[in-house]
Image (tube, rainbow, N blue to C red):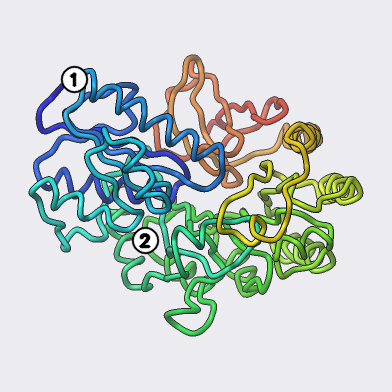
Amino acid sequence: MKKKTIDIITLGCSKNLVDSEQLIRQLEQSGYSVTHDPESPKGEIAVINTCGFIGAAKEESINMILEFAQAKEEGRLKKLFVMGCLSERYLKELATEIPQVDKFYGKFSWKDLLHDLGKTYDERLHIERSLTTPKHYAYLKISEGCDRKCSYCAIPIITGKHISRSMEDILGEVKYLVAGGVKEFQIIAQELTYYGVDLYKKQMLPELIEKISDVPGVEWIRLHYAYPANFPTDLFRVMRERSNVCNYMDIALQHISDNMLSMMKRHVTKEETYALIEQFRKEVPGIHLRTTLMVGHPGETEADFEELKEFIRRVKFDRMGAFCYSEEEGTFAAANYEDTIPQEIKQQRLDELMAIQQEISAELNAVKIGQHFKVIIDRREGDYFIGRTEFDSPEVDPEVLIMATEEDLKIGHFYQVEITDADDFDLYAQVIKK
């Protein structure tokens, strides 16, 4: 155990990661040394930033808390703190069930942790973070909360109403991060397209992205977690006109059958969904679309599922994730629907979807052989440098592998490459000599 060393463990999404990075900056300013995601406790104090989105995420968070609680019982840790979404939602229950934790904090009360360590939150550093990502890219959170009331989702219960950050605050953070070497920004929020409605009385995502695009040193901007209903279509123009706005959109659609979209309270129809996808591809040529789909929501029939499979085959998403419905207390679905679909059927449907997507991904990747792309290098791994194109977000999307024996590439630098081979998900390339 190292004195004045704190371990931060981040679970869940990139929005949680931003919170952890803000906390790390404050702790370092207060004189602590911080390690992120250690395999075992390194310091006297550990802070676990939890996720509470779905059952599997909650289970992972609880198991991590119990693992560090045991370390504390064995004397390998002096203090254990817990924050984040799971803690926000089940604070009292967790405090009763896991007394080894010194204190639980909600998602938005982590600043109190500093006070409990005898420190104070330094407001001068409110836009500063200590990045846990490679220094050339960062996640940029533009809002908190969500005003959507999808039937299955507990996020609005946990995070509250949508609150946009001011443009001035966001742009200040972008300039700060660029000064530290960041070239690529993943723009994140629980719901991107609602940005600005609370502050400026209208959707302001297109204007915000234009302003970020104008900041010198910003080379790639990628957009995550959009909502299909009332999509701000002026964003198409921004994506076309701005070379540093990647032709990439992460838009969670969840389902396609009108029956399921209605039961899920998505406020969009099958026809509108197809029309939006067609508009994306018409107005932003070459765009790569990522989506997330759900199987096993109460009421999903075999006919609904067949419709979903047909949707995937027809649209051919460039990137796709999927998950099984899990009942979350407090949601509309939990209160009004019976979760009657067996888990094995949910899993079978999930496996079917991902098998279809694997074939589509292999087909789309094969088309890229012989084409040229700009890539950024993230790391070296064994015999390969690992990079990404503008169509690939870190952690969740395919990667580009370049033989390290042939090139000496610099991490965080851009290169032009030719794709030489492809498998189901990843691409292989060689650098184009100048």
Q: Nearer the viewer, residue 31 or 152?
A: 152
Q: Amino acid at mark 1?
A: Gly
Taking 356 as reference, is 388 left or right?
left
The residue tagged with tag 2: helix, strand or loop?
Answer: loop
Tell me the quarter of the picture where residue 419 sits. Answer: top right
Taking 281 as reference, is 400 left or right?
left
Task: Kindly check if marks 1 and 2 are in contact, taking CB atoms under 8 A apart as contact.
Answer: no
Q: Earlier in the sequence, mark 1 or mark 2?
A: 1
Q: Nearer the viewer, residue 150 or 171?
A: 150
Q: Is residue 361 visible?
A: no
Residue in view at x 45 percent, y 44 percent: 51
Residue in view at x 79 percent, y 58 percent: 260
Q: Which mark is residue 216?
A: 2
The residue tagged with tag 1: helix, strand or loop?
Answer: loop
> Which quadrant, please, contains the N terminus?
top left
In the picture as drawn, the residue positioned furthest to the front comes out as 96
Q: Amino acid at mark 2?
A: Pro
Tell me the quarter of the picture where residue 430 sits. Answer: top right
Q: Nearer the viewer, residue 347 or 288?
A: 347
Tell me where residue 58 appears, x and y as whole percent: 49, 40
Q: Which mark is residue 317?
A: none
Tag 1 residue: 75
Q: Height in image: 156 above or below 384?
A: below
In the picture as drawn, the residue positioned furthest to the right comes out as 303
Tell me where residue 134 appears, x and y as whole percent: 37, 37
Q: Nearer the viewer, mark 1 or mark 2?
A: 1
Q: Height in image: 322 above or below 408?
A: below
Q: Is residue 120 visible?
A: yes
Taking 311 as reference, is 215 left or right?
left
Residue in view at x 56 percent, y 53 percent: 329
